[in-house]
Amino acid sequence: MVIVYVLLAIVVIFGLPFIRFAVRGSLLASNNRFACPNCGHNFYGKWYQLMFASGAVNAFNFANIRCPKCKIKDSCGVIT
Ligand SMILES: [Zn+2]
Protein backbone atom coordinates (compact mmCIF):
# COMPACT_ATOMS: atom_id res chain seq x y z
CA MET A 1 0.00 0.00 0.00
CA VAL A 2 2.99 2.29 0.48
CA ILE A 3 3.39 2.52 -3.28
CA VAL A 4 -0.02 4.24 -3.49
CA TYR A 5 1.14 7.03 -1.16
CA VAL A 6 4.39 7.36 -3.08
CA LEU A 7 2.51 7.67 -6.35
CA LEU A 8 0.12 10.17 -4.76
CA ALA A 9 3.06 12.24 -3.51
CA ILE A 10 4.64 12.17 -6.98
CA VAL A 11 1.38 13.33 -8.58
CA VAL A 12 1.09 16.24 -6.11
CA ILE A 13 4.75 17.25 -6.41
CA PHE A 14 4.73 17.21 -10.20
CA GLY A 15 1.13 18.31 -10.56
CA LEU A 16 1.35 21.65 -8.73
CA PRO A 17 4.01 23.23 -10.98
CA PHE A 18 2.05 22.02 -13.99
CA ILE A 19 -1.15 23.67 -12.73
CA ARG A 20 0.79 26.88 -12.03
CA PHE A 21 2.31 26.67 -15.52
CA ALA A 22 -1.13 26.11 -17.08
CA VAL A 23 -2.65 29.09 -15.22
CA ARG A 24 0.25 31.38 -16.12
CA GLY A 25 0.10 30.24 -19.75
CA SER A 26 -3.63 30.86 -19.92
CA LEU A 27 -3.22 34.31 -18.33
CA LEU A 28 -0.61 35.19 -20.95
CA ALA A 29 -2.82 33.78 -23.70
CA SER A 30 -5.76 35.92 -22.50
CA ASN A 31 -3.76 39.05 -23.41
CA ASN A 32 -4.25 38.11 -27.05
CA ARG A 33 -7.12 39.35 -29.13
CA PHE A 34 -9.04 36.70 -31.04
CA ALA A 35 -11.11 36.92 -34.20
CA CYS A 36 -14.28 34.86 -34.56
CA PRO A 37 -14.36 33.06 -37.94
CA ASN A 38 -18.19 33.12 -38.00
CA CYS A 39 -19.12 36.74 -37.27
CA GLY A 40 -15.71 38.44 -37.40
CA HIS A 41 -16.05 39.76 -33.85
CA ASN A 42 -12.75 40.67 -32.14
CA PHE A 43 -12.48 39.89 -28.44
CA TYR A 44 -10.07 39.13 -25.63
CA GLY A 45 -10.15 35.50 -24.54
CA LYS A 46 -11.03 34.68 -20.95
CA TRP A 47 -8.19 33.02 -19.05
CA TYR A 48 -10.39 30.16 -17.86
CA GLN A 49 -11.44 29.44 -21.44
CA LEU A 50 -7.80 29.37 -22.47
CA MET A 51 -6.72 27.04 -19.66
CA PHE A 52 -6.75 24.06 -22.00
CA ALA A 53 -6.20 26.02 -25.21
CA SER A 54 -3.10 28.06 -24.30
CA GLY A 55 -0.84 25.41 -25.86
CA ALA A 56 -2.54 25.84 -29.22
CA VAL A 57 -2.37 29.64 -28.83
CA ASN A 58 1.38 29.57 -28.32
CA ALA A 59 2.11 26.96 -30.98
CA PHE A 60 -0.47 27.62 -33.72
CA ASN A 61 -1.94 31.08 -32.92
CA PHE A 62 -5.51 29.90 -32.58
CA ALA A 63 -7.77 28.67 -29.81
CA ASN A 64 -10.95 26.60 -29.73
CA ILE A 65 -13.02 29.04 -27.67
CA ARG A 66 -16.57 30.38 -27.62
CA CYS A 67 -17.23 33.72 -29.27
CA PRO A 68 -18.94 36.12 -26.79
CA LYS A 69 -21.05 37.64 -29.58
CA CYS A 70 -22.45 34.72 -31.58
CA LYS A 71 -21.82 32.07 -28.86
CA ILE A 72 -20.38 29.62 -31.38
CA LYS A 73 -17.39 27.58 -30.25
CA ASP A 74 -14.88 27.58 -33.09
CA SER A 75 -11.18 27.92 -33.77
CA CYS A 76 -10.60 31.65 -33.26
CA GLY A 77 -7.34 32.98 -34.67
CA VAL A 78 -5.02 35.32 -32.75
CA ILE A 79 -4.87 38.88 -34.10
CA THR A 80 -1.26 40.06 -34.25
ZN1 LIG B 1 -18.69 35.14 -33.40
Image (cartoon, rainbow, N blue to C red):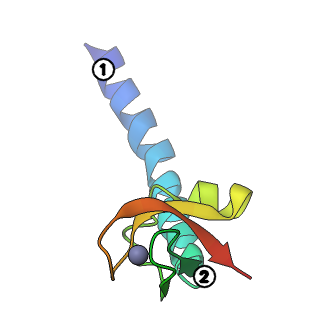
Q: Are marks 1 and 2 in contact (CB under 8 Å)?
A: no
Label 1 amino acid? Answer: Val
User: Element at badge 1?
Assistant: helix
The quarter of the rendering in which ligand 1 is drawn is: bottom left
Marks 1 and 2 sit apart, C-alpha to C-alpha, by 41 Å
Quadrant in the picture for residue 10? top left
Using the rendered view, name the quadrant where residue 72 is placed: bottom left
Say above or below: 27 vs 75.
below
Q: Residue furthest front?
A: 39
Q: Amino acid at mark 2?
A: Asn
Q: Residue at label 1?
A: 4
For marks 1 and 2, the one nearer the N-term is 1
Q: Which residue occupies 54% across, 71% down? A: 24
Is residue 69 toward the left or the right of residue 75 in the image? Answer: left
Q: Quadrant of residue 80?
A: bottom right
* Residue 33 percent location from the top left of the image: 58, 84
Q: Looking at the rendered structure, which numbered label has been put on residue 32? A: 2
Q: Could you classify mark 2 by the number of other residues whose Cα lies within 10 Å: few (under 14), some (14-19), or many (20 or more)?
A: some
